[in-house]
Amino acid sequence: DIQMTQSPSSLSASVGDRVTITCRASQGIRNDLGWYQQKPGRAPKRLIHAASTLQSGVPSTFSGSGSGTEFTLTISSLQPEDFATYYCLQYSSYPHTFGQGTKLEIK
Amino acid sequence: EVQLLESGGGLVQPGGSLRLSCAASGFTFTTYTMTWVRQAPGKGLEWVSAFTSGGLTYYAESVKGRFTISRDNSKNTLYLQMNSLRAEDTAVYYCAAPGMDVWGQGTTVTVSS
């Protein structure tokens, strides 16, 4: 199975800050990676698929990059509604696997 | 409106069984791979199982041999039969259609004596 190592596990930042979250795959997954946002008590919502393609309706402050084994999610200017938990998901091969999550908190 | 509605969660004793259902509407169910994802209390997301549009099934190692995914395309419904349940299976179980990023609201399974 492919392991996804996500870092950091938590992050404290302020509105307007730029933040980056990283996921590393235990083996190459091409660009078969998605980024998800989850708020408490809610189902996850996909922000990015294919490593860098923004889902329709997602603000352009979100961006993704990477391929192979290293991937990043960047939020260029944090908004109040961005404080949530973020997960990466590899879907290159089954079983699909999530990263451990990054909880983004207000400083 | 595209919608997934899970049901079947509840309290079950260790070693017991439960069957979750996920009723789909608003899209052509047969053409989409469907998945189950779970989240234990206070923990991260865990991918559980998938049933592809081509009829193949896949499982996480943690549930292999105990859980069975199935689908009834005539009823637009996905199922997860969970046997030999353990305390660590306690979680909110989400049904999802990844191809459209559509998720259900989740159903809670609690395994406890």
Image (cartoon, grey):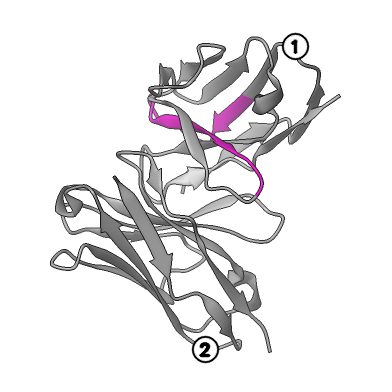
Question: Is residue A38 rendered to the left or right of residue B25?
Answer: right
Q: Which residues are magenta?
A: A22-40
Is B32 situated above or below A103?
below
Question: Is residue B65 rendered to the left or right of residue A102?
Answer: left
Can you identify the residue that label 1 sits on? A17
* Residue type highlighted by circle 1: Asp
Secondary structure type for disc 1: loop
Say which mark, if any, is on residue A39. Answer: none
* Residue type highlighted by circle 2: Gly
Q: Residue B32 at x, y = what percent?
A: 22, 48
Is B81 situated above or below A5?
below
Is A90 situated above or below B104?
above
Secondary structure type for disc 2: loop
Q: Quadrant of residue A104?
A: top right
Q: Callout 1: few (<14), some (14-19), or many (20+) C-alpha neighbours within 10 Å?
A: few
Chain name for mark 2: B
Residue A29 within the segment the image draws in magenta: yes
Residue A37 within the segment the image draws in magenta: yes
